[in-house]
Amino acid sequence: MRVEVLSDHPRFAARRTEQAAEQRRSRYEQAVADVRARHAARRWWQVWKLLPQWLELRRLQAQRPADEDQVQHRLAQQEAGIEAEDAMTSALDRLSDDWTVFRGYRNGRGEVDHLVVGPGGIWAIEVKNHPGKVHVDGDSWRSEVFDRYGNLVENRTLTDRSGRSWGRQVTDVSKALADFLQKRGRQALVRSVVVIINPRAQLGTVRRPGLALVSVGTDEVVRTLRQAPPTLGPASADEVARLVRRDHAFHEKRRASRDG
């Protein structure tokens, strides 16, 4: 199994979170140091400055970055997602050498964590690190999280920032890729998978998910790909891989132009 990293946005996002927090801390600490240095330069007989300086320092200290807990929580979430994606990549290493795993493939409908191309076809795999019990009913995905005493502490829908369900996140990308390949003479089915990787994850009711597979853990994913009937010969798989790289490069360039 070969791995190609097309993009590594999760690690980039985690670094950006850390850097932004560090910059806020540095600016605050420098501002405090500047005020203290200015106060230290006060002459001993300038007693009328004591109260204004004390008030100035108190006001500055009240501006201490107060989002440290939120930042650490966000960073922990990002790192957990990275660990889950790495675990999926490691598991896919059990595939034979005629499979290629693309990490971070992007097209006009979004990004998928793993796009796997090989003898058993094309598989788009979205990886989630989530500790709850996941229920699927069509395009409705929801989660129940219980504490150690069995009490329900969270019941929420599972969507991305744009409101798409976990299922639609990956199927939107899969359909766009299938359309792209078809327009270039490659009639290919792109199968969609959502895999949840977390020791506390469970699958509840799953009805009409519209996906090839919804799985907890990596074993079933690897087994499914291994057992998939052959649909792509070596030349076809190489051509699909070439088109995947081309499509990703186009959309990454367009995204960079839009954001930059």
Image: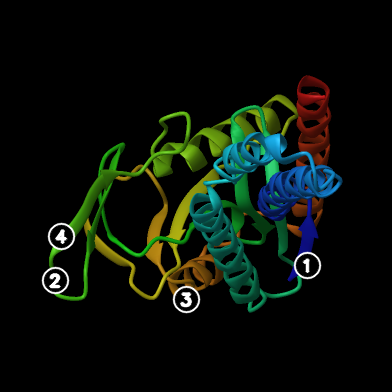
Mark linked to residue 219: 3
In the picture, measured across the screen, residue 51 lies left or right of residue 227, that is right
Residue 185 image-quadrant placement:
top right
Q: Position of residue 10 (x, y in %)?
A: 66, 52
The residue drawn where x is 27% and y is 63% is 203
Mark 1 or mark 2: name the one nearer the start of the chain.
1
Who is closer to the viewer here, 238 or 82?
82
Q: For the N terminus, which image quadrant?
A: bottom right
Q: Position of residue 125 (x, y in %)?
A: 54, 54
The residue drawn where x is 58% and y is 40% is 63
- The reply to whether dot 1 and dot 2 touch (C-beta < 8 Å) is no
Mark 3 or mark 2: name the one nearer the start of the chain.
2
- Which of label 1 and label 4 is nearer to you? 4
Quickly name the residue at label 2. 150
Disc 1 secondary structure class: strand
Who is closer to the viewer here, 234 or 255?
255
Disc 3 secondary structure class: helix
- Residue kind at label 1, given as amino acid type: Arg
